[in-house]
Image (spheres, rainbow, N blue to C red):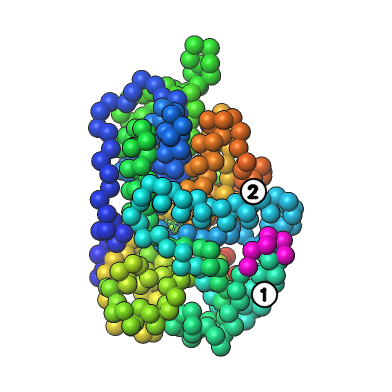
Amino acid sequence: MPQESNYWLTTVEMPASLRQQLPESADVAIIGAGFTGLSSALALAKLGVKVVVLESETIGWGASSRNGGMVLTGLKLGVNELISKYGRELTRRMYAASLETIDCVERIVKEENIDCDFARTGHLEVACKQSHFDDYARQAEVIAREFNHQLRIVPRNELRDEIGSGIYYGGMVDEVSAGLNPARYVAGLGAAAMRAGAAIFEHTMLQKIDRESQSGAPGFRLTASRGSLRARNVLVGTSGYTGAATPALRKRIIPIGSFIITTEALPDAVARELSPRNRQIYDSKNYLYYFRLTPDNRMLFGGRAAFFPETDQTIRQSAEILRRGMISVYPQLRDTKVEYVWGGTLDFCFDIMPHAGQMDGVYFAVGYAGHGVAMATWQGQRMAEWIADGKTDNPFAEIPFPGAPLGLYNGKPWFLPFAGAYYKVLDWIS
Ligand SMILES: Cc1cc2nc3c(=O)[nH]c(=O)nc-3n(C[C@H](O)[C@H](O)[C@H](O)COP(=O)(O)OP(=O)(O)OC[C@H]3O[C@@H](n4cnc5c(N)ncnc54)[C@H](O)[C@@H]3O)c2cc1C
């Protein structure tokens, strides 16, 4: 059995945060020390704003240290669906934002000197069916025409240059995407935010937010497990771990489990055979697999092996399901040892879109749907701008934020087994 722990965490030491009492007040209180919260804290602190981050566990404890480290362009929904839902203009701005997110991560990594193996390796999407491959050409044509962004279609007979697997019908490459070590990246963001003056409090769980005016100016009182503080503004960046302290937001987020295994380090020749260009790879299914090499040549292989968030049981089950999945893609790895397995929670909104805005005066940015390494970093920067300047250019704040159909949801996703079965059937028939 592989170790039930996160491989990335073996490569990093998280920065030490503050142990003293919470201050009486702050300009901005941020909930959650992941990419969203820390990117925002960094930007606000650099503007001289007094910012406090409350994290119920430890820096990067949530999805930000547990993910595949794929820094991806694009959104979860396809471009044609986006255009028909939101129109050309807004979709153009969203797509441009998705490209900007990669530059945003690269800029922060350079400026803050974060040692996280950021590399523009590009991503490769691989088609599980002929019909999926046929759709790539249509998508690439729309993206080139509407957004002036070039994707490269790779026919099946040329796919060996991209991936050492014979099971796919072709692929589509975006050279702009990148890969990084997410635990080192979130650790670096935390350290940079603290250097800039942000105060981070770990093991401090927000329990309640109440409105409280301060000398006539509107503001909030935050009650947390380690005391309370006043803040003029609050930003919630709790993603798939959003809980009872922000009930209105929780009702709009479906927490979905995603799981990853990593193998032992592979010999160079085997690693190059599996992924000759070291791409960030994912397939075309709804119930998808995503995979890549780590910087030390392990195969990292992830998927939604169970729909429920991570528990000892779902992690254990996922190890074997993912190993079988990995061998179906790469039979070469049949005898390779799987050393680590872990899981984390994704935040899906009902429309599978990122959302940012204010609810009852409290700012939030959520809804990354497994596409959050770059987008959460970018949203953190935009939210900082919005809070500090009172305005921002953020297309994801301009779209409606739907709740559950018929309001049938209180934050506990009773329908996940049905959703899981639905997507499995959809993958089978479409
Ligand atoms: C297994 C997995 C693989 C993924 N792979 C990729 C990938 O390859 N590429 C990609 O782009 N995206 C990927 N993602 C998604 C990406 O990791 C997330 O979108 C991103 O990390 C979200 O960052 P965040 O800061 O918003 O939230 P998180 O990193 O989840 O942080 C939220 C934090 O809020 C804290 N919190 C919650 N409630 C409270 C409270 N009441 N008080 C105080 N603190 C609280 C939590 O403890 C947590 O640390 C993956 C996710 C998972 C789980």
Across and down, in percent, residue 265 comes to 28, 73
Label 1 secondary element: helix
Judged from this view, the residue extending furthest toward the bottom is: 157
Q: In terms of sequence position, does the residue under pointer 1 or pointer 2 come before the other?
A: 1
Q: Nearer the viewer, residue 287 or 393?
A: 393
Label 2 secondary element: helix
Across and down, in percent, residue 322 comes to 39, 71
> In the rendered structure, which amino acid carries the disc numbered 1?
Ala
Judged from this view, the residue extending furthest toward the top is: 215
Q: Which residue range is magenta in the image?
A: 145-150
- Label 1: few (<14), some or many (≥20) within 10 Å? some
Alpha-carbon span between mark 1 and mark 2: 34 Å
Does the magenta portion include 149?
yes
- Label 2: few (<14), some or many (≥20) within 10 Å? few
- Res. 405 mark: 2
Q: Is mark 2 within 8 Å of ligand 1?
A: no
Which residue is label 1 attached to?
A: 137
At 66% across and 51% down in the image, what residue appears? 93
Q: Give the vertical position of 58 relative to 229 (above or below).
A: below
Q: Is residue 246 visible?
A: no
At 53% across and 68% down in the image, what residue appears? 175
Q: Give the vertical position of 418 relative to 101 (above or below).
A: below
Q: Give the vertical position of 417 relative to 247 (above or below).
A: below
Residue 163 as seen in the image, left or right of residue 408: left
Q: Is residue 337 visible?
A: yes
At 32% across and 26% down in the image, what residue appears? 22
Q: Nearer the viewer, residue 357 or 251?
A: 357
Across and down, in percent, residue 375 comes to 52, 51
Q: Quadrant of the N terminus?
A: bottom left
Residue 166 as seen in the image, left or right of residue 115: right
At 62% across and 54% down in the image, what residue appears? 96
Does the magenta portion include 11?
no
